[in-house]
Image: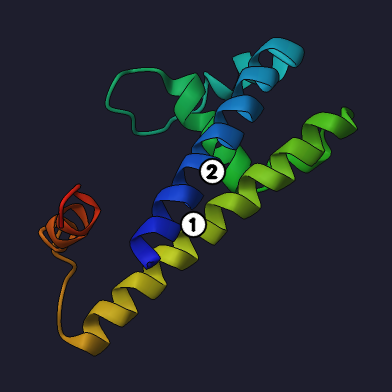
Amino acid sequence: MLILAFAAAAALSGGLQHRFLSRLEHQEPTVWSALGKRRVLTDDGDTSYAAAQWYLLNGEFTALNDQSLASLGRHARMSFFGTAAILIAWGVVAIAANASPRLTCFLGIFRLLAPGS
């Protein structure tokens, strides 16, 4: 159950972060270019995008004059932390149960759903 909650939360969080970062890039080009000058670790060399993610997670976006963009940033940030909380809960349950999820358990569901079962 937690794996499905995590997948849904991660999809929602990713979508909200993408919307925020896209709007930030297009509506606040001066902020976006300033973010590109920050020193951040990145695997693809896109420092603006990586710095903008830290900008979002640190809550620096609250200083923006655009209230709709700041509201979108708050939603994206909270969804990220909610997703992290679900992941932590999943880990705690796995530790408490002394087990890790096995995807082979889904094979039993497919057998139940198959016609003629």
Amino acid at the residue labelled 2? Ser
Residue 46 in the image: state x and y as whole percent.
Answer: 40, 18
The answer to whether the residues at label 2 and label 1 have Cβ atoms under 8 Å apart is: yes
Residue 18 in the image: state x and y as whole percent.
Answer: 55, 27
Mark 1 secondary-structure assignment: helix
Q: Residue at x 63, y 48 (%)?
A: 77
Residue 65 in the image: state x and y as whole percent.
Answer: 89, 29
Q: Is residue 56 left or right of residue 89?
A: right
Residue with the mark numbered 1 = 83
Point out the image quarter for the C terminus: bottom left
Residue 39 in the image: state x and y as whole percent.
Answer: 44, 30
Q: Residue at x 20, y 59 (%)?
A: 112
Q: Which residue is nearer to you in this view: 57 or 111?
A: 111
Q: In the rendered view, tell whether residue 46 sits above or below residue 1.
A: above
Amino acid at the residue labelled 1? Thr
Measure the alpha-carbon separation of dots 2 and 1: 7 Å
Residue with the mark numbered 2 = 13
Q: Is residue 62 left or right of residue 6?
A: right
Q: Is residue 45 left or right of residue 102?
A: right
**Label 2 crowd bin: few (<14), some (14–19), many (20+), radius 10 Å:** many
- Quarter assignment of residue 89: bottom left
- Quarter assignment of residue 41: top left
Q: Residue at x 50, y 20 (%)?
A: 48
Q: Is residue 81 left or right of residue 91?
A: right
